[in-house]
C-alpha cells in the first residue's frame, strides 16, 4: 500500500510539473506575442513616419526646385528686359548718330564742299599748273642761290617767301550759316549766355590758364605770380625770422625730429608754483 501511495504521489508531482512547464511555456509565448505585437506596431509607426518624412523631404525639394526655377525664370526675364533696353538704347543712339551725320554732311560738309567746288570751277587748271610750276621754280632758284639754306622759320619776303603759294589757296568761311549739329549744345549755351549778358559772348574755348611764352623772358617772369612764388619759396629762411609768416611746423614729412629737446620746445613744462609764498591766498578748511 505504501508503494502504491508513493507511486501515485510521484504521478501527481509529475503531472504538476508538466502543468507548470506548460503554463510557463504558454506565459512565455504570450510575452513573446505581446512583444512581437509591440515591435510590429513600432515598426509600422516608424515606417509610417519614415514615409511621411520622405514625402515631406520630397515636397521640400520640389518646392525648393520650383523656387530656384522661379528665380531662374525671373532672372531670364530680367536679362531679356535688359537686352531689350540695351538694344533700344543702341538703336536710338545709332539713329541719333546717323541723323547727326546726315545733318553735318548736308549743313556743314556739303555747304563747304559746294563753295570749294564753285571756286574750283571758276579757276583755270592751266593757270593753276603754271602757278605751281612757278612756285617750284622759285624754290629751286632760291635754294641754288643760297646753297640749300632755305628755312621756314627765317623768312625774308623781299628775297623769297615760301608761304606765298598758300595765300592763293581756296578759303571758305562758313560764318553763321553753318549749323554744326556736333556743337549744338555749345551753341545753345552761348545763345543763353548772350541773352543773359545782353551782349555778345566770346566763343573761345575754356582752357587751363597758362603763362604766355613772351612772359617767360628774364625781367618779365619775375613780375608775374609765378615769379613771386618762386622768389618766396627760394628765399633764405633767415629772412623770415621775426615775421608773422614764421612757423615751427616741419614741412619735411620724411625727416621728422623725434628728440626730447624738440618735444620740450613744442610742449614746454608749466610754471612752478611756490605755495609758501602765497599763504594769504589760501583758505584753511577744518
Image: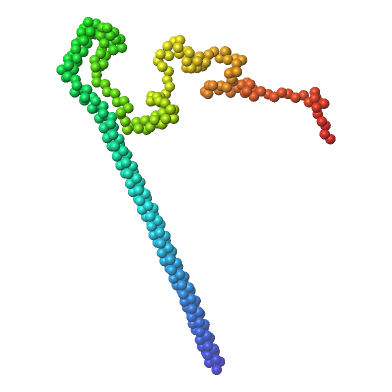
The residue under the point 44% across, 30% down is: 196
Q: Is residue 61 visible?
A: no
**x then y, percent, for residue 16:** 52, 85
Q: In this figure, which colouring scheme has been used for the structure?
A: rainbow
The residue under the point 45% across, 67% down is: 49
The correct choice, above or below, for 91 with respect to 194 in the image is below
Q: Nearer the viewer, residue 60 or 194?
A: 194
Q: Is residue 231 visible?
A: yes
**x then y, percent, for residue 85:** 34, 45
Question: Which residue of the protein is positioned furthest toward the bottom in this rendering?
Answer: 1
The correct choice, above or below, for 271 with respect to 61 in the image is above
The correct choice, above or below, for 285 with respect to 74 in the image is above
Q: Nearer the viewer, residue 186 or 254?
A: 186
Question: Which residue of the protein is positioned furthest toward the left in this rendering?
Answer: 126
Judged left or right of residue 83, residue 245 is: right
The residue under the point 68% across, 24% down is: 269
Judged left or right of residue 157, residue 9 is: right
Q: Nearer the viewer, residue 41 or 175?
A: 175
Question: Which residue of the protein is positioned furthest toward the front in this rendering?
Answer: 198
The residue under the point 21% across, 10% down is: 138
The quarter of the image holding the C terminus is top right
**x then y, percent, for residue 259:** 60, 22
- Corner quadrant of residue 256: top right
| Number of numbered discs overlaid on the protein picture | 0
The quarter of the image holding the N terminus is bottom right
**x then y, percent, for residue 54:** 41, 63
Amino acid at each position: 500500500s505504501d508503494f502504491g501511495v508513493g507511486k501515485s504521489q510521484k504521478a501527481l508531482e509529475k503531472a504538476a510539473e508538466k502543468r507548470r512547464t506548460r503554463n510557463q511555456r504558454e506565459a512565455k509565448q504570450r510575452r513573446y506575442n505581446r512583444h512581437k505585437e509591440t515591435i510590429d506596431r513600432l515598426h509600422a509607426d516608424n515606417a509610417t513616419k519614415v514615409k511621411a518624412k520622405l514625402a515631406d523631404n520630397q515636397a521640400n525639394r520640389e518646392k525648393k526646385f520650383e523656387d530656384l526655377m522661379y528665380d531662374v525664370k525671373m532672372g531670364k526675364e530680367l536679362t531679356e528686359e535688359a537686352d531689350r533696353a540695351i538694344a533700344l538704347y543702341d538703336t536710338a543712339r545709332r539713329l541719333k548718330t546717323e541723323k547727326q551725320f546726315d545733318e553735318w554732311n548736308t549743313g556743314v560738309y556739303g555747304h563747304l564742299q559746294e563753295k570749294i567746288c564753285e571756286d574750283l570751277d571758276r579757276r583755270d587748271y592751266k593757270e593753276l599748273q603754271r602757278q605751281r610750276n612757278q612756285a617750284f621754280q622759285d624754290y629751286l632758284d632760291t635754294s641754288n642761290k643760297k646753297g640749300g639754306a632755305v628755312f621756314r622759320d627765317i623768312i625774308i619776303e623781299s628775297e623769297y617767301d615760301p608761304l606765298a603759294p598758300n595765300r592763293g589757296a581756296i578759303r571758305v568761311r562758313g560764318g553763321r550759316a553753318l549749323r554744326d549739329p556736333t556743337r549744338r549744345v555749345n551753341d545753345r549755351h552761348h545763345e543763353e549766355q548772350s541773352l543773359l549778358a545782353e551782349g555778345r559772348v566770346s566763343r573761345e574755348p575754356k582752357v587751363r590758364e597758362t603763362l604766355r611764352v613772351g612772359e617767360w623772358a628774364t625781367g618779365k617772369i619775375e613780375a608775374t605770380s609765378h615769379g613771386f612764388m618762386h622768389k618766396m619759396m627760394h628765399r633764405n629762411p633767415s629772412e623770415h625770422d621775426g615775421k608773422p609768416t614764421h612757423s615751427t611746423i616741419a614741412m619735411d614729412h620724411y625727416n621728422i625730429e623725434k628728440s626730447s629737446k624738440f618735444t620740450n620746445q613744442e610742449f614746454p613744462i608749466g610754471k612752478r608754483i611756490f605755495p609758501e609764498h602765497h599763504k594769504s591766498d589760501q583758505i584753511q578748511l577744518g
